[in-house]
Amino acid sequence: MANERSLSDKIWLVLKGLAMGTANKVPGVSGGVVAFVAGFYEEFIYSLQKINRKAFLLLSKRGFKSFFEYTNAQFLGLLFLGMIISYFSISKLLDYFLLHYELYVWSTFFGMIIGSVYYIAKDFGKWNRKFITYLLLGIIIGISISFLEPAKENDNLLFVFLCGIIGVSGMTLPGLSGSFILILLGNYVLLLVDSVNALFDTFSEVFVGDFSFYENETRLHLLKVLVVFSVGSIVGLVTLSNVLAYLLKHFRKITNAVIIGFITGSLGVVWPWKTKIFEKDNFGNLVYDSNGRGIIKSYERYFPSEFSYEIIYAILFIIVGILILLVLDWYHKIKMLQNG
């Protein structure tokens, strides 16, 4: 299976990993949606499920080749390579656009999620009362999560480990944004901005022969935080994949109905028109993190009251987001016809 992949398939897998990594970085957007829409969600879940006791027995008794083939390691490795690259490339670019063109970024993702709901729901089949109930349950949970208030930042390593387990949900559960969960847990900036930047800065310094980071206690702590978070994420990936593999195998349509509901409910998180509400102390002063950024307490969503060029552009970006998914649907249909 993994050995038969062509070079173009391998490149596409890295690009899909790039898309998943970028989506995971955006609060309200789920990397799992990318996997679902791009058609490799089930292979992703079932491959993760195979990182189990049997896999390590194969490694010890038959060697690395048997382990590699059983776990579909080439597939997972190429995906994770793309995700890692995204954190040091596209994610940096995305941070820039979120800082300077936030409304248009949110508008594009809002449109893409609308397109995702259509893309996933169109092949669902017949809806009955039971499936509609599970759909509504997913929507209610998705909307409820979007209105929770964030906790305060906590760099306790045990809590960071738990953040890794919970935060990785965005890769395995379409519609449940891992980044947004980390915001609710209070550790989004610590885990996906500060610690990742610390790793990037460390690599940059080591590349030019500068090893002074050993004397930087703050840097070393952030790197330790990133390692613990990564270990927690791996544990979460393997655990959640086993649960989801079981649900997909035994309750496929119910699981898909809940996933469609999650994705629909997440539209509230990425609603383009919102105002940031910042944390304040008892004296009414803004509370800042260690990097001088105001800590976001919540978002106040609103409907635009008047038409302007900014609103028109935002609506156009929503349409662009929807079109991206429609083009992807068209591409898959063409590919299926060529292969059939």
Image (tube, rainbow, N blue to C red):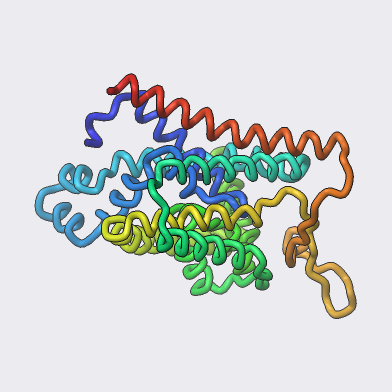
Image coords of residue 249 (percent x, y): 27, 56
Residue at x 52% of width, y 68% of height: 160
Q: How far across and down, in percent of the image, does residue 275 sit?
A: 80, 56
Residue 96 visible within the image: no
The correct choice, above or below, for 292 with respect to 323 in the image is below
> Can I make out residue 4 in this image?
yes
Q: Is residue 51 left or right of residue 335?
A: left
Screen quadrant of the N terminus: top left
Left or right: 262 as drawn, with respect to 313: left
Q: Is residue 250 left or right of residue 229?
A: left
**Residue lying furthest top in this view?**
338
Q: Name the residue located 15 percent from the left edge and 45 percent from the top edge.
A: 66
**Horizontal and vertical percent for residue 285?**
88, 71
16 or 125: nearer the viewer: 125
Image height check: is 167 above or below 65?
below
State the residue in front, 167 or 65: 167
